Image (tube, rainbow, N blue to C red):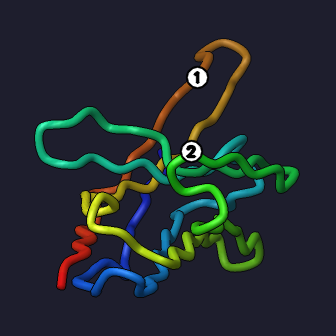
Amino acid sequence: QVQLVESGGGLVQPGGSLRLSCAASVSIFSINRMGWYRQAPGKQRELVASITSDGSANYADSVQGRFTISRDNAKNMVYLQMNSLKPEDTAVYYCNAVKYRAILGRTDYWGQGTQVTVSS
């Protein structure tokens, strides 16, 4: 079982920055992929950014060049640095962990979410 706890959300003005943090209860060496998703009111949850165990990162087109995902394996932490925030980035952001195992296949774990509001 993997428990994930997010922090760092809040209210920020357009053009501002926030850094989200996700603390994992297990060594993230054992996790194939860590990621951040978001869900705005009335919309489906979408992938924002992900990073594999070998450090390969992937971003949604809407955040490319503005957001950066990183991981600290020693601290079992994953971060999302968000710059040049826009009102359309407003959403609940969820930390996600994916494990692939031979018999169980893919298992997703989720944090409780943290609210990010971009408004003047």
Distance of mark 1 from mark 2, alpha carbons? Answer: 22 Å
* 23 w.r.t. 19: above or below: above
**Is 77 left, or right, of 88 in this rendering?**
right
Total count of labels: 2
Residue 113 percent location from the top left of the image: 28, 60
Question: Which of the pair 108/30 is nearer the observer?
Answer: 108
* 63 w.r.t. 118: above or below: above
The residue that mark 2 highlights is 60
Name the residue furthest left: 42
Q: Secondary structure at mark 1?
A: strand
Q: Residue at x 66, y 12 (%)?
A: 103
Q: Residue at x 58, y 51 (%)?
A: 49
Image quarter (top left, top right, bottom left or bottom right) of the C terminus: bottom left
Residue type at numbered disc 2: Ala
Residue 19 percent location from the top left of the image: 49, 81
Q: Residue at x 70, y 46 (%)?
A: 58
Q: Secondary structure at mark 2?
A: loop
Q: Which mark is residue 106?
A: 1
Q: Residue at x 31, y 78 (%)?
A: 9
**Callout 2: 10 Å neighbours few (<14), some, many (20+)?**
some
Residue type at numbered disc 1: Arg
**Is 100 left, or right, of 42 in this rendering?**
right
